[in-house]
Amino acid sequence: MPLIEITIIEGRSQEMKKDMMMNVTNAVAESLNAKKESIRIVIREVSKDHWAVGGMPMSELKR
């Protein structure tokens, strides 16, 4: 039973996460010749205050 853990920054819509889960499931099923029903995905959403790039929190970086 494959278990995939994905860590992302908060802020994406439920629809985007649902699409990602389906795409990842399909890719893993094909790559490992695994049944989709056996694949598990855990998404961890991290606050922009708790995700740093170059020592700066994402909440403080200009986009």
Image: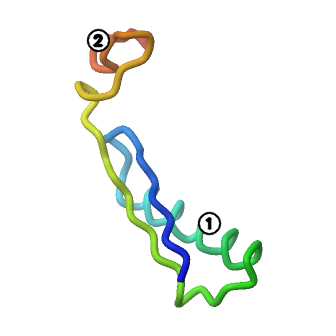
Q: Percent position (x, y) of residue 29?
A: 68, 79
- Left or right for 62, reference 30: left
Could you say which is closer to the camera, residue 32 or residue 18?
32
Could you say which is closer to the camera, residue 26 or residue 50?
50
Numbered disc 2: secondary structure = helix
Question: Do tag 1 and tag 2 residues touch (Cβ < 8 Å)?
Answer: no
Give the residue displayed 75% in from the left and 84% down from the top.
Answer: 33
Q: Percent position (x, y) of residue 59?
A: 28, 19
Numbered disc 1: secondary structure = helix
Q: Residue 60 carries which label?
A: 2
Could you say which is closer to the camera, residue 53 or residue 15?
53
Give the residue displayed 59% in from the left and 86% down from the top.
Answer: 36
In the picture shown, does residue 47 fall above or below 56? Answer: below
Give the residue displayed 63% in from the left and 90% down from the top.
Answer: 35
Give the residue displayed 36% in from the left and 10% down from the top.
Answer: 55
Q: Residue 23 carries which label?
A: 1
Marked residue nearer the N-terminal end (1 or 2)? 1
For badge 1, the amino acid type reads Asn
- Left or right for 6, reference 11: right
Q: Identify the image quadrant of residue 48.
A: top left
